């Protein structure tokens, strides 16, 4: 092979390599602009699943008095936020300051006439724990259960009550207990602690992947610097996004099939009983910790759309509730247990409260409308006042 031939091969190889490098840079540049423009112009609502799924929904029925623009902003602030890591509960609501959604540095959601932090013992202080329904996904700060509870309790008791909303997306009773105990340990001691549970006990009937993800992250160690750089490239980010979407689609289809398949009753009973047993243990542990610090407790079993609710009134019931496929069986089984023996003398069953209610009670598949939030808050307040759980002085 002559030198001229080698030179020709070299030039051709160099040209191919240069074109590949240029193409790689151009593709990454285009993807970078596409990702940036997607969130700023084409999809300003980010990962908002409600607006994507129900773009033609008549929002005035659910959010009376709010413009479509305000509803879009509210839902954007609800769903575009990312959670942060918590050493106590694995994840937590991140600090956020918006128009309709505001989360304090202490981790509670703010509302009108919010109490100070640290708490002021001149007030009667109430901590409310729960999942995203307690936090108030899909409603404004002042339309959550804790916000309404502060209003109705203050009016009913004739004294200054300050309620703190420690609801957190996907929390179940174990995480709520851990957070409650951590607050006690750090000398944040309320007069009363209220735990609103039910939905996530069965939505998280099998322990979630969160702990396994944290374990894997710790065991994996720090990735090589070059790998960190590669993971930040737009082409890699786009590929991972496509992979996540494909996996999510498979999970949804699998969950939907499991939701419709009622044949495996043995597994359902096993999972439901394990979830109920976990809840009962957490009630006992919360009561024990509260008693040691002189804190009164109230355990509320919340309403859910898949139990004693006319789904013909539910604008988002299409497709069922595959993500919460154990909830109906769990509620039915737990209802029988509660009729025989209450989990606590300070237990409030609210699962049946929506049986004869009219109107739109949900802002998406599972999260409460402002109307249902207020009704639940009033029910809780009636129990507290009726049992004279706090003094009026």
Image (cartoon, helix red, strand yellow):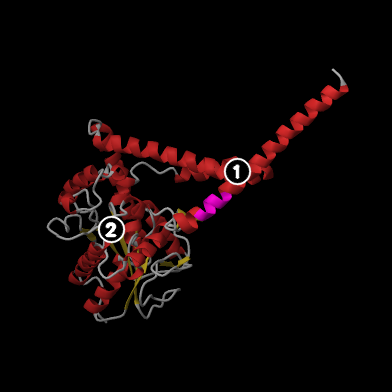
Report the front residue among 162 and 53.
53
Q: Earlier in the sequence, mark 2 or mark 1?
A: 1
- Say which quadrant the C terminus sits in: bottom left
Disc 1 on helix, strand or loop? helix
**In the image, residue 250 above or below residue 191:** above
| Percent x, y of residue 35 | 53, 51
| Percent x, y of residue 20 | 67, 36
The segment highlighted magenta reads: 32-37
- Mark sitting on residue 358: none
Q: Which residue has dot 1 on it?
A: 27
- The residue at 53%/54% (across/down) is 36
- Whether the magenta-drawn stretch holds residue 36 is answered as yes
User: Would you call the spot at circle 2 few (<14 residues within 10 Å), some (14-19), or many (20 or more)?
Assistant: many
Q: Report the Cα–Cα distance between label 2 and label 1.
A: 40 Å
- Mark sitting on residue 363: 2
**In the image, residue 147 above or below residue 14:** below
Residue extending farthest left: 356
User: Would you call the spot at circle 1 few (<14 residues within 10 Å), some (14-19), or many (20 or more)?
Assistant: some
């Amino acid at each position: 092979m002559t030198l001229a031939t080698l030179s020709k091969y070299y030039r051709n190889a160099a040209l191919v390599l240069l074109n590949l490098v240029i193409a790689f840079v151009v593709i990454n540049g285009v993807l970078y602009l596409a990702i940036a423009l997607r969130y700023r112009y084409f999809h300003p609502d980010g990962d908002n699943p409600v607006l994507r799924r129900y773009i033609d929904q008549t929002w005035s029925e659910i959010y009376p008095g709010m413009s479509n623009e305000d509803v879009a902003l509210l839902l954007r602030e609800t769903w575009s936020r990312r959670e942060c890591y918590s050493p106590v509960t694995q994840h937590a609501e991140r600090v956020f300051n918006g128009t309709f959604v505001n989360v304090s540095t202490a981790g509670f959601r703010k509302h009108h006439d919010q109490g100070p932090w640290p708490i002021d013992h001149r007030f009667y202080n109430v901590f409310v724990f729960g999942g995203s329904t307690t936090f108030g996904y899909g409603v404004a700060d002042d339309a959550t259960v804790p916000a309404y509870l502060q209003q109705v309790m203050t009016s009913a008791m004739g004294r200054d009550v300050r309620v703190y909303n420690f609801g957190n997306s996907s929390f179940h009773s174990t995480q709520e207990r851990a957070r409650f105990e951590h607050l006690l340990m750090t000398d944040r001691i309320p007069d009363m602690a209220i735990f609103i549970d039910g939905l996530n006990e069965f939505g998280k009937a099998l322990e979630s992947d969160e702990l396994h993800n944290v374990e894997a992250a710790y065991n994996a160690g720090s990735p090589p610097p070059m790998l960190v750089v590669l993971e930040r490239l737009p082409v890699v980010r786009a590929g991972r996004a496509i992979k996540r979407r494909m996996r999510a689609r498979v999970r949804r289809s699998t969950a939907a099939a499991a939701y419709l398949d009622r044949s495996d009753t043995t597994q359902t009973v096993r999972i439901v009983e394990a979830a109920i047993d976990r809840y009962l243990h957490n009630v006992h542990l919360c009561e024990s910790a509260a008693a040691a610090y002189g804190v009164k407790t109230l355990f509320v079993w919340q309403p859910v759309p898949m139990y004693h609710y006319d789904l013909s009134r539910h604008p988002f019931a299409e497709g069922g509730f595959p993500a919460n496929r154990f909830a109906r069986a769990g509620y039915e089984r737990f209802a029988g247990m509660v009729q025989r023996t209450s989990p606590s003398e300070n237990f409030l069953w609210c699962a049946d409260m929506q049986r004869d209610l009219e109107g739109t009670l949900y802002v998406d598949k599972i999260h409460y409308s402002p109307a249902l939030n207020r009704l639940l808050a009033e029910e809780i307040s009636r129990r507290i006042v009726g049992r004279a759980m706090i003094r009026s002085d």
